Image (cartoon, helix red, strand yellow):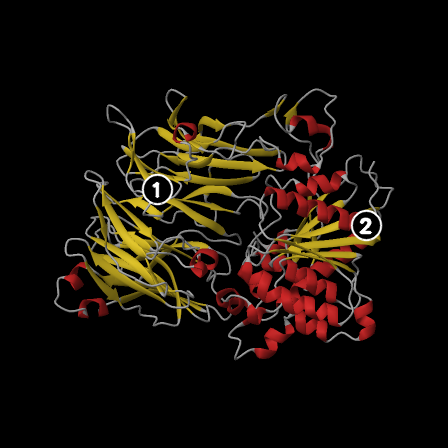
Amino acid sequence: MSLLRWPLLFLLACVSLSITVPAEASEQLVLEDLFQAPALDNRPPRKIQFVPKAEQVSYLRGSAEQPDFHSLWVYDIPTAAHKLLVSADTNQKAVAAYRWSDDGRRVLVLFNGKLHLLDTQSETAELRQLTGSEYQVREARFSPRGDMISFVHKHNFYTVKVASGKVTQHTFSETNQHSYASADAIATTELGRERGYWWSPDQKFVALTKTNTSGTEVQLGVLELASNTLRGLPLAGGSSGYLISVDWLPDSQRLSYQWQARNQQQLDLWLAPVASAFAKSNQDGFEQQRLLVKETSPTWINLHQDLYFLNDNKHFIWSSERSGFKHIYLYRLDGKLIRQLTSGDWSVDRVSGVDEATGVVYFTANEKSVLERHLYRANLNNSNTSQPTRLTAPDGYHRVHFDEQMRSFIDYFSSPTQPPQVSIHGPTGQRIAWLHENKVTTGHPLARFADSWQTPEFGTLEAADGSPLFYQLIKPPAFNSQQQYPVIMQIAGKPGKQQVLKQWGDHFPQYLAQQGYLVFTLDSRSSGSQGNELESGLYKNLATQETSDHSAAVRFLQQQNYVDSSRIGLMGTNYSGFVSLQLWLQHDSPFAAVAAGNPITDWRQHNQHLAERYLGHPIDNSQVYANNSVLDGFSALTAEQTAERPSLLLHYRLDEPTIASKHSTDLLKLLQQRGVMFEMMAYPEFDSAAELHQLRLLEQFFADHLHPTRD
């Protein structure tokens, strides 16, 4: 999808919400409606997954009165029957998580940190508690054969035998200095790795991590179950870097791991022998590691979870942005590239699965439109790399999950006019059944707002370098192009995170539109939606490029006859709060009011992985960090420039201590020293009551400064 194919400006026709309700349905939202039960969009069941070896789908669902108090259900596809497996009411606890054994016979259920087991094929089918109050269970999962269950308690790795209930502790960290088999905070928030241990398919070994308290050091080891021997596996990248993922090969003889250098400009895929290393009397076997793939970039490398080893133990699938767009590649196990499987000026979102029997790889991508995601398939024999077969039809956003046989998939779908739906499909895309059709008809929570619900318009505007920037605009009900309206620009994204999409949106922008605002969202060049060449322009240049793109959006808005240029507001949170404050700092800031939530004010105080990805090492790039610091930028303002700042609201979540403590104190002190009057709110706990309060706060702040007129 060449950028040259996108016109400078386009608007999609505004279509109405897909609902069938009486004509008198014309209520407007109040903020409490955003927190009602059931939710306005009648959201689908949670944690939906296929039951292994069965034509069934399981899910968590609450009652109408307690939608977040979940029970475990199973849907039988042939009979279209729903069956309750584990009731939250009966056990006085909601089901927090569950996991099936590979044979689909047993299901592991987590209640309040305690493990329970249900054998669905036993005569009694009773829920059996496996661990007591002495264990606070995390990361529980079945062993491959299903006769053991592994979990993490405090800082150590344990297993429990299903038949006897015998618990065995395998690692022994006695202090808080180190933790085994757990993903640290950086892994979960920045690397996309949410687990700290991995069973080998033959159940002989468990690979597990050892991390220090700060998460700055990670080691990898392999536990042999038969001897209960744990041996360290030396990471080829050394100690300065990040463990991205660990994957066993199907033969259980070897494992792979992805290692990212600290500067994030190199990503290596390593293959390490395991079985042969344990067969020796020392660890020399681990030293026979082989580098399979090395990815490099002059800026940074975006991570992925698309590695897939084929069952022939001779090939694997890998994704890369080396062409400028993310695509899929087939490799031989010795590291030789066989062929590229997809190509073109569009990006693969993620690999959804591989059907080795038919030689097909399934993936989601934005091939049809930057604003959409669809499911595609491509052949491993490379028949047509640039034109894969699309399997999902409705325009919008599709997220899919396949069963283990690659014969069916679950499609999570939404669009600007269709709240989230869930359906079950065959491998060619044909729908088999609805799990959550979610038609908006009479009685649907959204039905009474039919006439006032606004469908977003989508378009492009031009960045300073001529690149197209995609935007979304929600207009007030009964919009009149001859009138002028205030605008709230919502900065909702972060680098690599696209926000302008043809999917069902948040409800607060709808509420603001019904109060008389135009609500505008922009995907800057950093969103990654148009390839990594545009995205990488952000490197060491966060503040300048982000303010340039959003300033271009302001100029675009100022050119529209229906926009009141003196009443433009801005809001953003976290990274978007950082961008909001950078725009607030501009000496000719066009905004009448700016709200920043938990803003990043000084990258020198932020987490290492995120800061160094975009700005480099702080010691080598001290001026770069200063140029991108809100604190340094504010300190450089003259007294006259300081007095000209727009109205400012700062709001903080104290349950996010890194932001609340490190980034707020210095900013607040500086604002006070310079005599800047501003508003502030802090939330010790961010529950639904606090979130409602926050939305009221934002509503009142913008009403005071932008003065909307509600029709």
> On screen, 40 above or below 580?
above
Q: Is residue 32 left or right of residue 92?
A: right
Query: Which percent across, then down, holds residue 295?
Result: 41, 65
Q: Quadrant of residue 451?
A: top right
In-front residue for pair 69/442: 69
Q: Is residue 30 left or right of residue 209?
A: right
In-front residue for pair 604/244: 604
Query: Which percent across, then down, holds residue 637?
Result: 76, 74
**Which element type, helix, strand or loop, lies under badge 2?**
helix
Q: Amino acid at mark 1?
A: Lys
Q: Which residue is mark 2?
A: 704
> On screen, 201 above or below 92?
below
Residue 366 is at least partly visible in this image = yes
In-front residue for pair 243/118: 118
> On screen, 229 above or below 200?
below
Q: Amino acid at mark 2?
A: Asp
Q: Which residue is mark 1?
A: 114
User: Of marks 1 and 2, which one's residue comes earlier in the chain?
Assistant: 1
Q: Residue at x 32, y 47 (%)?
A: 134
Q: Residue at x 36, y 72 (%)?
A: 239
**Which element type, helix, strand or loop, lies under badge 1?**
strand
Q: Residue at x 31, y 54 (%)?
A: 197
Query: Which percent across, then down, holds residue 567?
Result: 82, 52
In-front residue for pair 35/672: 672
